[in-house]
Amino acid sequence: MIIVPEREIAGLISAEESFEAVEAVFGAMARGDAYNFPVIREAIGHADALYGFKSGFDRAGLVLGLKSGGYWPGNADKGLTNHQSTVVLFNADTGQPHALVGGNLLTALRTAAASAVSIRHLARADARVLGMIGAGHQSAFQMRAAVRQRDFDKVVGWNLHPEMLPRLAETAEELGLPFEAVSLEELGAQADVIVTITSSFAPSLLAAHVRPGTHIACMGTDTKGKQEVEAALLARARVFADEIAQSVSIGEAQHAVAEGLIAESDITEIGKVIIGAAPGRQSAEEITLFDGTGVGLQDLAVAARAVELAQARGVAQQVEM
């Protein structure tokens, strides 16, 4: 069994390699070559923790496994990351354990890669202003991945807690872009692409904030009850998702579907756009929205790539099982 510790991940897999892995597995899902298993997510009744599993199988790449982990809100006080994840890969031919991979950084990379895939395939080619809603840990990964997809001139940002906005400003400076802290109304008025990455249970971005031609990547809603944008916004947009079943059950679309504003049949799997089986953006005035709920196959794809790189570079540890 191969072990790739968390400490090795940063030196192994790049944002571009993560993008390629996620884009490829979305395409495999659309072709029917890969599928996710039902998500398990539970409050364990200890340490206020949420714990769960995401798993799946990619027949094309013979990648089988699961990501185990969750959210421990008290970890920050212990000098640890609140979100903890580990990926386990299995030999698809024998069922034997193949690899154990640290999943914390991989989760941030694959989440940012998914929004970047949506920007590449759905945003207007002339998009120049990037809007960021949310300034938590993952926001920096999201911004870095987004700017690889379009020639942005500026970043505008909003966060419920303004004292966290320096993270966005520092990341924009690192990328050579000016940053402006704005209201939600001003963010919608300026931004051509908007990335939401919050853990909110109440919408921040309203339908009235968003102008025609905008692409929105909603990346924070992954649990029943969470919500980042007003449900009416989905009714104004063409809606795409990583996986439709998760989108309507635990993703941003759960609210619009429950209110009868859109139907499940109104949502397009992003993988179908990638493989040319469904159209992406159809006009410069169209609003497009990607509901990125985070699927297990994303985690398996980036973990499998990390294992390949670890073996090639001689940093993988091997143990007998």
Image (cartoon, rainbow, N blue to C red):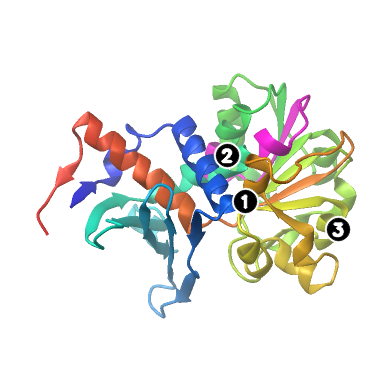
Between the C-alphas of marks 2 and 1, the distance is 9 Å
Residue 221 relative to residue 215: left or right: left
User: Height in image: 90 above or below 178?
Assistant: below
Mark sitting earlier along the chain (2/1)? 2
Tell me the tag on residue 142. Answer: 2
| Residue range of the region highlighted in magenta in the rendering | 118-141
Determine the residue positioned at 75% across, 66% down.
Answer: 264
Residue at the far top: name it.
176
Q: Do callouts 3 and 1 mark residues in contact (Cβ within 8 Å)?
A: no
Q: Residue furthest left?
A: 320
Which residue is nearer to you in this view: 285 or 52? 285
Q: Nearer the viewer, residue 118 or 57?
A: 57
Q: Given this view, does label 3 or label 2 mark the residue nearer the observer?
A: 3
CB atoms of marks 2 and 1 within 8 Å: yes
Residue under the point 60% across and 51% down: 30
| Cα distance in 3D space between marks 3 and 1 | 18 Å
Q: Which residue is mark 3?
A: 235
Q: Secondary structure at mark 3?
A: helix
- State the residue position of label 1: 219
Indicate the secondary structure of the residue bearing disc 2. Answer: helix
Mark 3 or mark 1: name the one nearer the start of the chain: 1
Can residue 71 be seen here? no
